[in-house]
Amino acid sequence: MQQSRYFNRELSWLEFNQRVLEQAMDASNPLLERLKFLCIVSSNLDEFFEVRVANLMQQVQTGSNIADMDGLPPKTAIELIRTRVRRMVADQYRCWRRDLHPALRREKIRFRDYPKVPKHERKHFEAYYLREVHPVLTPLAVDPSHPFPQLLNKGLNVVVELDSDSDQLDFAIVQVPRNIPRVVPFSKSGDDGMDFVLIGDLIKHHVGSLFHGVKVKGAYLFRTTRNSNIDVDEEEAPNILRAIEEELRKINRGAAVRLEVEENCPQRVVEQLIETFNLESEDVYYIDGPVNFVRLMPLTAQIERPDLRYPPFRPRTVVKFDDETSIFNQIRKGDILLHHPYENFQTVIDLLEQAIEDPKVLGIKQTLYRTSSDSPFVHALIAAARNGKQVTVVIELKARFDEAANIKWARMMREAGVDVVYGVSRLKTHAKMMLIVRKEGHNIRRYAHLGTGNYHPSTAKLYTDLGLLTCHPRLTAEVAETFNCVTGVSKFPEMHELVLAPDNMAATFQKLIKNEIANAKRGRPSGIYAKINSLVEQNIIDALYEASTAGVPIRLLVRGMCALRAGVPGLSDNIEVRSIVGRFLEHSRIFRFENAGKSRLYLGSADWMPRNLFHRVETVFPIHNKDVFARIEHILDICWRDNVKAKVQQPDGTYTPRPRAAAEPPLDAQATFIEEG
C-alpha cells in the first residue's frame, strides 16, 4: 500500500498529546509541574473524545465511508485512534505508578489508599464521610422499575454490584456530586507532610451505608465521556443566544463515546455498562490508578511547595506611563510589540482603561472569543459605555466550551448599553482586535491592538502570544472596516494591509508561497518560516510540497497537529517540522516569507486549518515597524535554535528530541525569553 502524502490529523494530535506526556516523564521538570502535565494529558483527551472522536463516530453511525485526505475512512481512523490512545493511557498511568507517585511520596506528598490508613485516620474519615458526603449521595437502583440514570458528561460514578439470589445482574449507580472535593486531606501526620485520600475510594468503601438489608459484592469507579458538539442552525434559529443555551442543556444527554472503568471491575458489570451506553468493547479504557487525573490539577497550585514548581518570574513592563504621559502618546511614537507571558498583559488592560477615562476617546470596538471568569475587559467595556463612550463588542457565542460564559457576558454588556453583536452567521469570529477612536484636535485618529491570542488575562500568563499596539493609518482604517463588515451586513472590501478569512486569507497565503517558488527558480533568496499551532489544510500543504521541490527552504514550528510529512525524498526534502512543548503553551502565529531578500512578516489569529481559513473571521496583519520586525526575527531565531524542548517530526509521524552538536550549548527558548528581561 502506497504511503499517503499526509498524516491523519487525529493521530497527529495524539502525538502532540504524547509530547505533553513526555513533559510529565521528564525528570528535569519540577515535580508538581510534572503532575500538572499528567493532568493536562487527561484534560486534552477528554476534549479530544468529546469533539473529534464523537464526530468520527457520528460519521460511522450515519454510514459515511468518506476518507479524509490521508486516505483513512472514519471507521479505520477510529480503530487506529483507539489503539494509540490505549498505548498513551498505559504510558500515562505507568508514569504515575512507577515515577510520580513514588517521587511525591519521597517529598512527603502522599496519596494513600483507603482504607489502608492508620486506625485513628480511618475514624476521622468515617466521621467526614457521615458528615460531609453521605447526606448528598443518592443510590439509584437499576432494574425494570428503575431506569438507568442520566449520568453527567465526565462525571465520576460508582457502579455497585449487589448480591442477588437470581442470575440477573443486580446493581446500582451512585453519582459522585461535583460540588464535593475530589481529594480529601488527612489530618496532620506529624512529619510536616501532606496526605490525601481520593473521594472515590472513600465512597466505594462506605457505599454499603446506602443499602440496608442488601449485601454489596463490589463497588467500582467509572466515568463516561459524551458527544459535546453543539449543532445550531443559525439560519433557522430566531434567537441564536437562546438556541445555544438550549443546546448546552443537551450536552449531558449526548451520546457516550468513551467509558473509563477501574481495572478490577468484573467483566459482566462492564458488559452491562457497554450495553447501557450503546458502546462497543473497544470503547472501554481500563484504568489502574485515579480515574480522572484532571481532578488533581488544583493540588498542583494549592500545595505549598514552591521548590517543586517552576521558579516564579515577573513579566516585564514594556509601556510605562504616568499622569503626564498617556499610552496613546507612546503608540504615536511607533508601533509597540508585546510578547506574552514574558511581557505584561496588563498593558492591554491599561490601554482600555485609559480609553474609558480619556475625554478624547469617542468609541471602542473589541472582539471577545474567550475571556476570564471575572474579565476585566467586560467590566471595562461596561464602564466605558456608562461613561458615554460608543462601545461595540463582537462576542463569539459558539466558542467551544466557553458558550455559557460568553452568553452571561453578552447579557451583562447589553444591559449596560454596550452594542453586542454575535458575529457573522455560520462563521466564528476568532480575530483578536481592539479599536479605539480618538478625537485629536480637528482630526480623528484610530488606535488598535491586534493579537495572536485571546483577551484572557489568565491564559496570557500561560500561553505565548504576540500583540501589536499601533496607530498606523492604513492598518487601523482596515481594522475599522472589518468591524463594520462584521457588525453590519457588508461584504469585506478589498484590503491592502489586513489579510482576512474567509475572504482572502487562503488565496493570500497561496500567493505568498508561490512567490517564494518563483524566487527559488530564478535563483533569488527564498524561504518560508511559519510558527503555528496546527497545519492540516490540504491546499497549503500541497503548496509547501511544491515549494520544497522547487528548492525553497521551509521551517515549520508546529506545536500540535501537522498533517504534512517532512523530509520525504522528492516531496518534502527541504521541509523540517519541529514542535516545542514546555512550561508555556506555544500559541503565537508568525508567518515569514524571504521575498528575494526583502522579508515579509505577518502575525495573526489563524492557523493553517480549514476552519481558520474558510469558516472563521480571522485576521493576519503585516509588520512594518523596523524595530518590531527585528524583535520578531529574534523570537523566530531563538525558537528554531531551541535544543532542550524542541522535538523533530520523523517519517512515521512521531517526534524525537532535536539533535544537539557536542559543542552546542543547551538552549531552552522559553527560559531564554524569561532571562532576557
Image (cartoon, rainbow, N blue to C red):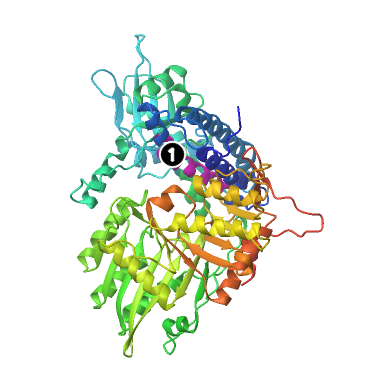
Residue 198 in the figure: left or right of residue 250: right
Residue 149 quadrant: top left
Q: Is residue 38 magenta?
A: yes
Q: Is residue 212 above or below residue 565?
A: above
- Residue 154: where, in percent of width, then height? 39, 38
- Residue 198: where, in percent of width, then height? 47, 39
Residue 126 quadrant: top left
Question: In the image, what residue occupies the spot 22% across and 64% down?
Answer: 414
Look at the image and give the residue range highlighted in magenta. Answer: 34-54
- Residue 40: where, in percent of width, then height? 51, 46
Q: Is residue 161 magenta?
A: no
Question: In the image, what residue occupies the spot 53% across and 45% down?
Answer: 561
Q: 267 or 480, which is in the foreground?
A: 480
Which residue does the numbered mark 1 point to in the structure image? Answer: 52
- Residue 13: where, in percent of width, then height? 53, 42
Residue 268 seen in this snapshot: yes
Q: Amino acid at mark 1?
A: Arg
Residue 101 in the figure: left or right of residue 216: right
Question: In the image, what residue occupies the spot 66% across and 42% down?
Answer: 568
In the picture as drawn, the residue positioned furthest to the left comes out as: 238
Which secondary structure class fits the magenta region best?
Answer: helix
Q: Is residue 28 above or below residue 99?
A: below
Residue 110 seen in this snapshot: no
Q: Report crowding for label 1: few under 14, some 14 to 19, many 20 or more residues within 10 A (C-alpha).
A: some
Residue 307 quadrant: bottom right
Q: Secondary structure at mark 1?
A: helix
In the picture as drawn, the residue positioned furthest to the front comes out as: 522
Quarter of the picture holding the C terminus:
bottom right
Residue 472 in the figure: left or right of residue 6: left
